[in-house]
């Protein structure tokens, strides 16, 4: 696999992890920091678009690592890809 493609896939993984961290939690958590009397769990949430977006990002970054795992000839790189997939799964849920 070309080193530029591999670098691009690792950068895609890194961007995906950053997005997973940005979209974790509830979108109303900031309200309890402004007014401690407001609980984010009491606010009705009609849709769960955040979770759908996080699952989509998780699919993309796991797919990217699986591509590296399948194309790589070196065992340490395959092991690193497997570790990164497990890390993404832990961070997502």
Image (cartoon, grey):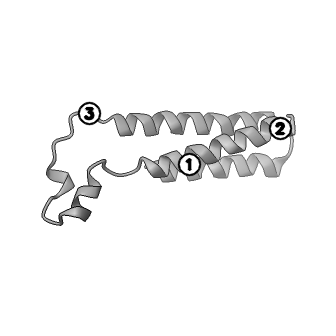
Q: Could you say where residue 61 lies in the image, as x and y percent from the top left?
A: 60, 39
Q: In the displayed structure, does residue 23 sit left or right of residue 44?
A: right
Numbered mark located on residue 28 in the image: none
Q: Residue at x 16, y 47 (%)?
A: 43
Numbered mark located on residue 47 in the image: 3
Q: Which residue is mark 1?
A: 17
Q: Residue at x 86, y 45 (%)?
A: 74
In the picture as drawn, the residue positioned furthest to the bottom comes out as: 36
Q: Which image quarter: residue 33?
A: bottom left
Quarter of the rendering occupied by the N terminus: top right
Mark 1: give few (<14), some (14-19) or many (20+) Cα within 10 Å. Answer: some
Q: Could you say where residue 15 lies in the image, as x and y percent from the top left?
A: 60, 45
Q: In the displayed structure, does residue 49 sit left or right of residue 2?
A: left
In the picture as drawn, the residue positioned furthest to the front comes out as: 34
Numbered mark located on residue 4 in the image: 2
Q: Against 1, is 23 above or below?
A: below
- Element on which disc 2 rests: helix
């Amino acid at each position: 696999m070309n080193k530029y493609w591999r670098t691009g896939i690792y950068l895609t993984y890194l961007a995906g992890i950053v997005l997973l961290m940005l979209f974790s939690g509830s979108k109303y958590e900031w309200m309890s920091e402004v007014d401690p009397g407001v609980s984010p769990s009491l606010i009705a949430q009609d849709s769960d678009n955040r979770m759908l977006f996080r699952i989509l990002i998780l699919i993309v970054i796991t797919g990217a690592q699986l591509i590296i795992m399948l194309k790589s000839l070196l065992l340490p790189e395959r092991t690193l890809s497997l570790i990164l997939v497990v890390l993404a799964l832990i961070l997502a849920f």
